Amino acid sequence: MVGRAKALRRRFQRFEGLAFFLAGSAWDALTLTRIDRLTDNLILLSYVLLLGALLVLRRRLEKLPERWPRLVPHEEKIGFAVQFLFGGLYSAYVIFYGKSAASDQSLLFVGLLLGLLLANEFLHDRLRGRRLRVGLFTFCTFSFLLFFIPVLTGWLGRGVFTVAALCSFGVGALVVWLAERMPGAVDLTRQALRQQLPVVGGVLLLLGGLDLLQLIPPVPLALMKVGIYHDVRRVEGGYELVSEPGPWWSFADDDSAFLRREGDKVWCFSAVFAPTGTGIAVVHRWELQDPDSGDWKTTDTIPFEVMGGRQGGFRGYTRKQNVQDGRWRVVVETGSGRVLGRHNFTVQSTDAETERVWSSRLAD
């Protein structure tokens, strides 16, 4: 029986990495439920700290193996642990940033995270360079602090990015110094710092550029739902969303193809998730597309407050009267201008004599 098991493993050994990758990703998807959950954040914090410690230890073993004779035989296992921690962090970031990426632009950053996750699983033999490891560690540290600081403090201002970047640079510099310092060889230590600290700074400058282009999802915020309706009513247990049923083949559960009659109002309903204990301003920006130029022109900007902590997101709505026919969209954004998502819809006038059929659903 043991012989058969070994033979079977040898036969499918090349698929072991893929199997562990899929199993680990599925486990993260099931267990990482909320970005503001304390236990999830503490687990990820322990990953970041342990990863930094193992990177230091691994480099010390490379430089001074004679000082660590008992650990040298386990150097390969330390490498596997580093790979596991990188994979665990990337997988968690894909989930958390993916939930927050409602716009097409921010999905590019999630694609970058997914690419790093796949590279870590299947190209780990090529990711052993010192500078590359430091750069990836800086990226992981920053990606964690960008949502951990707001979750920990309730602060969601523009300065969060700067604080996360400064802390990441400090942590990266500390890891490099601990890994490269040589007793009695100050010049060699300084040379290593000059070689690797630009990598830390370069990663953070790259992330700063991505943030200016709004390619980084606005974690820990997330747009849970947005839709267009003929009416939104506050009822016991939630909100009643009223719309006209679309054709049988349509997957839309709202009035994205809005059939307008005289006196109709257009309602936009949204639900935005924010961490417990935080409060932010959310804006519904109503925009109409110019049929000639194709440009989007703002017609209304309507703000309202969001209080964090609710699993399904804080619900809010705005409405607009006297809407002309054409292509419209509502941009859901923060008070500071960070886009949480967009919802496109069309408005078309219809015969007032046609009988109307209504459909309603409860948003709890």
Image (cartoon, helix red, strand yellow):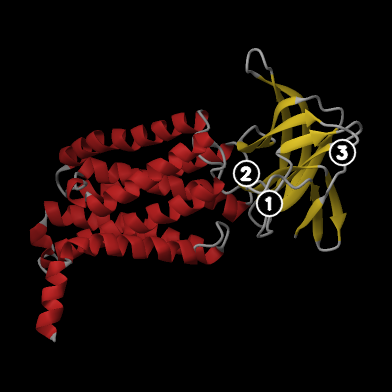
* 295 vs 324, nearest the viewer: 324
Q: Is residue 344 left or right of residue 5?
A: right
Residue 245: percent from left, percent from top: 75, 47
Label 2 sits on residue: 156
Give the foreground label among 2 and 3. 3
Task: Bin the neighbour count of mark 2 within 10 Å (Cα to Cα): few under 14, some 14-19, many 20 and up.
Answer: many
- Secondary element at tag 2: loop
* 107 vs 280, nearest the viewer: 107
The image quarter containing residue 176 is: top left
Residue sitting at the far bottom: 1
How far apart in space, not on screen, are marks 2 and 3 (Cα)? 49 Å
- Label 2 amino acid? Leu
How far apart in space, not on screen, are marks 3 and 1 (Cα)? 47 Å
Label 1 sits on residue: 278
- Secondary element at tag 3: loop
Q: Are marks 2 and 1 in contact (CB under 8 Å)?
A: yes
Q: Residue at position x 41%, y 42% from top? A: 111
- Label 1 amino acid? Thr
Label 3 sits on residue: 354
